[in-house]
Amino acid sequence: MNYTEEHKKLFERAIREARQTSSFDVPVGCAILKDGVIIGAAHNQKEELNDVTGHAEIIALRDVQKKFGTWRLNGCEMYVTLEPCPMCAWAIVSSGIDKLYFGSYNTQCGAFGSVMDLRNTANSKLEVYGGIEEEKCDKILNKFFDTLRGSSN
Amino acid sequence: MNYTEEHKKLFERAIREARQTSSFDVPVGCAILKDGVIIGAAHNQKEELNDVTGHAEIIALRDVQKKFGTWRLNGCEMYVTLEPCPMCAWAIVSSGIDKLYFGSYNTQCGAFGSVMDLRNTANSKLEVYGGIEEEKCDKILNKFFDTLRGSSN
């Protein structure tokens, strides 16, 4: 993987998005890039919007699709702070995005290696790089889950 | 499975939806029920809406969620003419829908038995019944793909 300083700077946008997540939602942020420019970004809003499909990746995908008037996102890259679930993974693969960089590994339902790899089912050429800025991304998630556990005690 | 005349009548709504699909989209229809009443229905609009998430199931789920102000659809059933893909399957499982009845088996990417079973990953209690009105559902799909093949010759 060729992860440059430029990538690092751009990945920060996904991290900033994660930090903007409401306190009800699992903090996950996502950014979509084309030619090195961020063309869309979102955070998880499942609880906030009462939408089971309201994950960061789906919201960002739909936003970019609307802007560009097409669901075909070839030539784009996605940065996301958590390994996508099967719902998001299939949407990403179907959109034709070229490269995916994710932060934390999702041992519950990660669909790009941790629990399954949906690229095999889709016969997809999507390049996937996991563990990007992993410590930062883990920290954001751990803080959320620690608070959750604390409040349920 | 206890598939009654009442179920058959209700499944017709999913079939009618499939028939309403635009000629650009794979014809798939879906209906969501609560207490035997249809509370939402949709057809595939991926190409029509230029939305990679615009499958019948996702559109119907989002519609019902909006109507009821919650993503929790426990106590609901879904009828769909084609076995869901991984994206839709994960959304269905996450929504807490109780029962799913699908028509045609999806040998490409069916995520409730044909290629994988995402209920295992989710540790879900969703009841799934496949092959409902299969002949009718297959016919609608075959007609679409025959036309597609014909026009590309």
Image: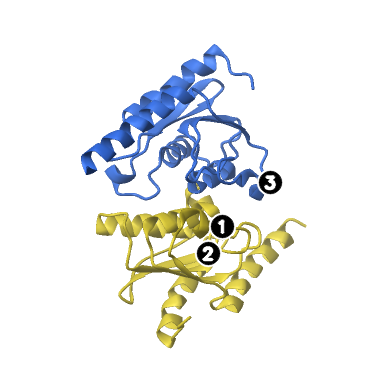
Chain colours: A blue, B yellow
Q: Nearer the viewer, residue B87 or A97?
A: B87
In this view, B68 is above or below B17? above
- Report, in whole angstroms, how far the alpha carbon at label 2 lies from the one at label 3: 23 Å
Q: Which residue does the image show at 60% across and 35% down from the upper left? A: A74
> Residue B97 location, x and y as percent?
38, 63
Name the residue type under label 1.
Answer: Asp
Identify the residue position indicated by label 1 in the image: B25
Asked if residue A23 can be seen in this view, the reply is no
**In the picture provided, is B79 more to the left or to the right than A36?**
left
Residues marked 1 and 3 touching at CB (< 8 Å): no
Question: Can you tell which of label 1 and label 3 is closer to the viewer?
Answer: 3
Asked if residue A6 can be seen in this view, the reply is yes
Circle 1 marks a residue in which chain?
A: B
- Report, in whole angstroms, how far the alpha carbon at label 1 lies from the one at label 3: 21 Å
Name the residue type under label 2.
Answer: Val
Residues marked 1 and 2 touching at CB (< 8 Å): yes
Q: Which labelled disc corresponds to residue B28? A: 2
Q: Which residue does the image show at 58% across and 42% down from the upper left? A: A93
> Residue B59 location, x and y as percent?
41, 56
Identify the residue position indicated by label 3 in the image: A123
In this view, B114 is above or below A44? below
Q: Nearer the viewer, residue A38 or A83?
A: A83
